[in-house]
Amino acid sequence: MVWVKNRRELLGNATSSLNRKAREVALKAVEAAIDAVDPRRAVKSKVSLSDGTLKVGDLSFNLSSFKKVIVVGGGKASGSMAEALEEILGFHIDGGVVVVPRGTKDNYKTRRVELQEAGHPVPDEGSVRGAARILELAGQAEEGDLVICLISGGGSSLMSMPKTGVSLADKRAMTKMLLRCGATINEINTVRKHISMFKGGQLAEAAYPATLISLILSDVVGDPLEVIASGPTVPDPTTYRDAARVLKHYEIWDEAPKSIKNVLMDGVSGRIRETPKPGEPAFRRVHNIIVGNNRIASLAAKSELQRSGLNTLFLTSFMEGEAREVGIMLAALAREVGASGSPVPKPCGIVVGGETTVTVTGDGIGGRNQEIALSSALKIAGLNGTVIISFSTDGVDGPTNAAGAIVDGSTIARSRKLRLNAVEYLRNNDSYSFFSKLGDLIFTGPTGTNVNDVSVIVCI
Amino acid sequence: MVWVKNRRELLGNATSSLNRKAREVALKAVEAAIDAVDPRRAVKSKVSLSDGTLKVGDLSFNLSSFKKVIVVGGGKASGSMAEALEEILGFHIDGGVVVVPRGTKDNYKTRRVELQEAGHPVPDEGSVRGAARILELAGQAEEGDLVICLISGGGSSLMSMPKTGVSLADKRAMTKMLLRCGATINEINTVRKHISMFKGGQLAEAAYPATLISLILSDVVGDPLEVIASGPTVPDPTTYRDAARVLKHYEIWDEAPKSIKNVLMDGVSGRIRETPKPGEPAFRRVHNIIVGNNRIASLAAKSELQRSGLNTLFLTSFMEGEAREVGIMLAALAREVGASGSPVPKPCGIVVGGETTVTVTGDGIGGRNQEIALSSALKIAGLNGTVIISFSTDGVDGPTNAAGAIVDGSTIARSRKLRLNAVEYLRNNDSYSFFSKLGDLIFTGPTGTNVNDVSVIVCI
């Protein structure tokens, strides 16, 4: 599919035929990457029905052996996933509920799966209604029934059900407090799972003894199942005691909402049940299947580069860290290709996936991918036929309307002609303004999927 | 050669046989890397004499056609380079002077090349004496003579000759001022070359019309010839005007030493000569040859890993940026190997070269390589058979007595048993203390060479 809306302009900005060719090839890789993790395509690549046999990844099920098939789930991509699943299973689906972000329900045409709207990124009453409805449906499922759960990024907010007595406001206040005191994402999740009735495997517990297949579009680097949408169908190794310890460690126990402290104390003393743990019966019939992730997008980009006739290398889908430093690293790869033909000889394409962060110190506008691109531009200045693109697969890089940016060996020279000081723009976290002036932002619009970021290096 | 002195302890720290094997293989790669850029070996790998034909890299010279052969140069490794050259050329060398750091002269046995001592990293009167002597010898060389120049890291300080009227103190004050105001290394070099009589191609100018072969052991990432030892045999594209502009740009013109302002003004007005520029006759008979660099060390590490039976990949010799971010990147590669067998399938070894920096915010003790290792340890925790080493080829990582450090998937677990909080040690730039307690520092002692840093990932 044509995702890059300003392709013509981006090619027109090339200052040499080599750069133009490299831009062209790199942009095709971008589109292939997004295509590969389109939620509908992701579901269809892993799920098929033929002669009554339902295949999900390597697993096979005799569909007629199930008394009832219901579909639940939530996330920014879960509406599309539900559509695709309906196309595959059709009348076999007996019903279900999938929660989608407010204002997007009309984008999807499902006939058997009901769509409910809820708040994202901040959960609202719709989130609670959605989660309650899902837990109800899952709870009604019996042995011999099949529950298919569609999970994607945003699911944690869209399906949210605090334990009795805890209000959404309490939950929000708690999360803010944890963020402020510097708790790690794992610590925050430990607390969140224990004040929830849905997260941390509790949906799986509700569905037991039905068979549960969770189709997961991963928006977290490394696909940790217990983290994606807070792992409603995944065992939770953490405990109430761990959660309480986090609040005490950061010395926010005293100021934490009373309702939350009550829940944690009740949990520690055994008055309310623990989240389900690894090895518990609740997971005996649970199959968590990744249908799309950063690696799939990155490998699709690599395949496209290969089709364009390049030698290719996929480095990692685990790239993390400060965006500008990753930019230096990408440039270091391109420079070595130019100097010695390592790690792959020209003409070549290298793909790196993951998700970086930006430590904001300036007051400009930008996104992590645009900052990667700007940082790398400074280091590849002068290299002809060398292009680096970094982009967000969801089409929205940081608080901007661009997916990312494209640079080549002449980017810095072009910026000098416009009297732009690239170092200053980078220092000021103002990559969006920089690329806006050069016309080298990549615009795709929201893509409806999210498997984090992909960077593509092309040297020809 | 056995460089790693505490090999036995480092192997003893392994918590599994896979980790032990991975440590063993990675440590052998370290030794191979250092061996490959030993200054003597570096010179001998590029220079040979056979039947009166002097071969230097791809070049051939009829040695008997030269009337006189003199050897000059300076740097921390140049004493060893001179020894090696004497072993190759013997009585063909008619004389020469090479400048080495104070207190190291007795380490070398040269018979035809005189060794002089000078200050490093701060130039002293010895630096001036050495540079003057070299310029004198080069100036006496005539058409038909051969001047061989031995350049290595530290040469800029060891061979230092300010322009008339500029004192060493003025020069030092100027450099300090430039560093303080945030000038880039290129800008600092532009100023330095124009207040020097030696740097920026001026040695080549003095040697003209003799033939000049410069053998260079590169201690700068990417081998920019004009930067290594300030490029005494390399054209200088920058001008007095550029140098003056740097001082004005950073608004330090007024406070700059008067002697330096005088030199720059004389230069701008044409009263004193420019440094020699690209294309000038002075460089017609100049051959700048890299005999050792980071890539050679990295590729030797890769070859050693290959000999150990691993699938190997050399990524880049251009790695730069913040050490802890590079550590995350190395871990991202190891994690992908574990998850998908990309970029190379197990058992594998990946080599990355370059030189990182550390932005110090804590008050601990550490070096850039130790910080890379600590940062990566946090991200590979739990991966069995995965080892990461980062080390400085000169054997001295930052202000410590260690060359670097080794980590594996059990490093964090081992540190927890010792009640060490790895995150805190990293936050406090205290990697040396951390690894000291674990016994995972790598000790080689000073190796006598320097081609920056090499990191090795082994996954078996």
Image (tube, coloured by chain):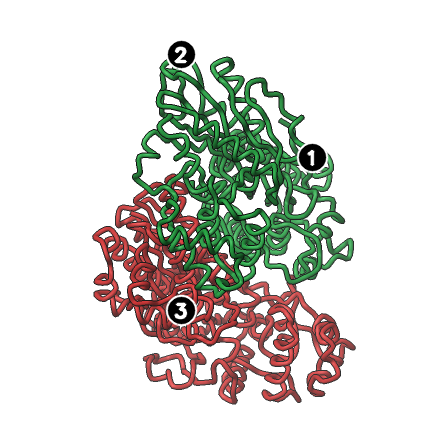
Chain colours: A green, B red
Asked if marks 2 and 1 touch (Cβ < 8 Å), the reply is no
| Three-letter amino acid code of the residue under disc 3 | Ser
Q: Amino acid at mark 2?
A: Gly
Using the image, tell me which numbered label, if any, was put on residue B431. Answer: 3
> Dot 2, crowdedness within 10 Å: few (<14), some or many (≥20)?
some
Dot 1 falls on a residue whose secondary structure is helix
Camera-side mark, 3 or 1: 3
Tell me, yes or no, if residue A389 can be seen here. Answer: no
**Residue drawn at x 49%, y 17% as measured from the top left:** A94
Between disc 2 and disc 3, the foreground one is 2
**Viewed as shown, does residue A62 lie left or right of B180?**
left
Indicate the secondary structure of the residue bearing disc 3.
Answer: helix
Front residue of A202 and A42:
A202
Chain letter of the residue carrying label 1: A
- Residue indicated by mark 1: A7
Write down the chain letter for disc 3: B
Vertical position of residue A182 compared to residue B362: above or below: above
Say yes or no: labels 2 and 1 on the same chain.
Answer: yes
Vertical arrangement, residue A52 with respect to residue A163, above or below = above
Q: Is residue B306 left or right of residue A290?
A: left
Q: Residue at x 47, y 81 (%)?
A: B120
Q: Secondary structure at mark 2?
A: loop
In the image shown, does B385 or A460 lie closer to the viewer?
Answer: B385
Residue type at mark 1: give it.
Answer: Arg
Q: Which residue is mark 2?
A: A52
| Distance in Å between CA atoms under marks 2 and 3 | 59 Å
Residue B7 drawn at (x, y percent): 24, 65
- Asked whether the residues under the numbered discs 2 and 3 touch, taking CB atoms below 8 Å apart as contact, a structural biologist would say no
Distance from label 3 to label 1 (Cα)?
Answer: 47 Å
Q: Chain of mark 2?
A: A
